[in-house]
Image: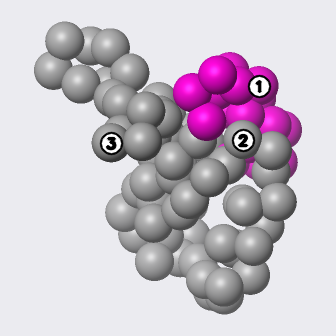
Amino acid sequence: LGIHPLPVEIARFVYRSTMRRLEDEGYEVILRLNSAQEPYVTDNGNYIVDIHYSTPIIDPAKEQLRLKNIIGVLETG
C-alpha cells in the first residue's frame, strides 16, 4: 500500500474543507474527475480524492484510523 494512489471517499458538501484538512495533515490529494472533467460522484453521492504517498504505508490500520478521524472523510481504500 502507498505505491499507488489511495482512493478516499469524502462528503460532497464539505469537500473543499476536507481536502484542505488532508493537505494540512501533509497529504497530497487530487480530486478525481470524470470524463467530462467534473468531480467523480460515487453511488452515495460523494466525491473521491486520490491520496499520493511518497513511501509505502507501513501500518494500514493506523493510517485508516488517521484518515477517518478527519472530518468529511467517509471511507478509504
Q: Is residue 63 left or right of residue 66?
A: left
- Residue 62 % position (x, y): 74, 81
| Magenta segment boundaries in residue numbering | 11-27
The relative height of residue 38 versus residue 55 in the rendered view (above or below) is above
- Asked if the residue under mark 1 is in contact with the one under mark 2, i.e. CB atoms within 8 Å, the reply is yes
Query: Residue type at mark 2?
Result: Gly
- Visible in this render: residue 33? yes
Q: Quarter-wise, where is residue 36 in the image?
A: top left
The relative height of residue 18 versus residue 1 in the rendered view (above or below) is above
Secondary structure mostly seen in the magenta stretch: helix
Q: Which residue is mark 3?
A: 43
Q: Which residue occupies 82% across, 60% down?
A: 69
- Residue 40 % position (x, y): 33, 29
Q: Which numbered marker is on residue 72?
A: 2
Q: Which residue is mark 1?
A: 17
- Residue 26 % position (x, y): 77, 47
The relative height of residue 25 versus residue 34 in the rendered view (above or below) is below
Q: Residue furthest left?
A: 35
- Asked if the residue under mark 3 is in contact with the one under mark 2, i.e. CB atoms within 8 Å, the reply is no
Nearer the observer: mark 2 or 1; the answer is 2
Q: Pointer 2: residues within 10 angstroms few (<14), some, or many (20+)?
A: many
- Residue 67 % position (x, y): 72, 60
Nearest to N terminus: mark 2 or mark 1: 1
Nearer the observer: mark 2 or 3; the answer is 3
Q: Pointer 1: residues within 10 angstroms few (<14), some, or many (20+)?
A: few
Query: Residue type at mark 1?
Result: Ser
Cα–Cα span, label 1 and label 3: 21 Å
Q: Which residue occupies 73% across, 34% down?
A: 18
Query: Residue type at mark 3?
Result: Asp
Residue 12 inside the magenta-drawn segment: yes
Q: Quarter-wise, where is residue 41 in the image?
A: top left
